Amino acid sequence: MAEDREPDQSKSIEQRPEVVAFGVVLRRYRKRQGLTQEQVSWNSGVDRKFISRIEGGQREPALGTIIKLTTALGVDLGEFMASVATELASTIPRLPRRKNITS
C-alpha cells in the first residue's frame, strides 16, 4: 500500500475551528460507513496515523488527500465539504450585527 503523508506540521499546531470541523465530519462519514481508520487507510493510501490526526483536528490535509479520503468513503467531494461548512458554522459563535450608522 502506498502511503500518503503530509509535510510535517508543528506538533503544537493550534486547533483551528475549520481543521477540527473537517476532522469531525471525516470521522462521522467513516463511522456512518462502518469503516475503521485502517480500512479507510487501505482504500485511500493515506497513512492510518495521519487519518487519526486529521480526525482529531491535529492535521490539515492537502486537497489531494481530501480527494483520496472522500473517494475511499464513496462520498461526493462537494457534499463532504458542505457538511464541513455546516459543522463549522455550528461551532463558531455568531457575532452581533452591526448597526448601520447614518450621518
Image (cartoon, rainbow, N blue to C red):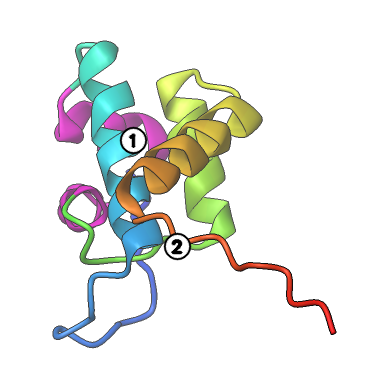
For disc 1, the marked residue is 25
The main secondary structure of the magenta stretch is: helix
Q: If the image is split into quadrants, where does the C terminus sit?
A: bottom right
**Mark 2 or 1, nearer chain start:** 1
Q: Is residue 17 magenta?
A: no
Q: Is residue 43 magenta?
A: yes
Magenta segment: 36-55
Residue 22, horizontal then vertical, whole percent: 37, 48
Residue located 33% across and 48% down the image = 21
Residue located 55% across and 39% down the image = 81
Q: Is residue 92 left or right of residue 101?
A: left
Residue located 55% across and 60% down the image = 97
Q: Which mark is residue 48?
A: none
Q: Nearer the viewer, residue 45 or 95?
A: 95
Mark 2: amino acid = Leu
Callout 1 secondary element: helix
Residue located 41% across and 23% down the image = 73
Mark 2, residues whose alpha carbon is within 10 Å: few (<14), some, or many (≥20)? Answer: few
Residue 32 found in image quarter: top left
Q: Is residue 93 left or right of residue 70?
A: left
Residue 17, horizontal then vertical, whole percent: 33, 61
Seen from this angle, which residue lies furthest right?
Answer: 103
Residue 69, horizontal then vertical, whole percent: 43, 38
Please determine whether, in this image, residue 14 is positioned above or below residue 65.
below
Seen from this angle, which residue lies furthest front?
Answer: 103
Please determine whether, in this image, residue 44 is positioned above or below residue 32.
below
Res 4 seen here: no
Q: Nearer the viewer, residue 71 or 100?
A: 100
Q: Nearer the viewer, residue 71 or 54?
A: 54
**Number of callouts:** 2
Q: Which mark is residue 95?
A: 2
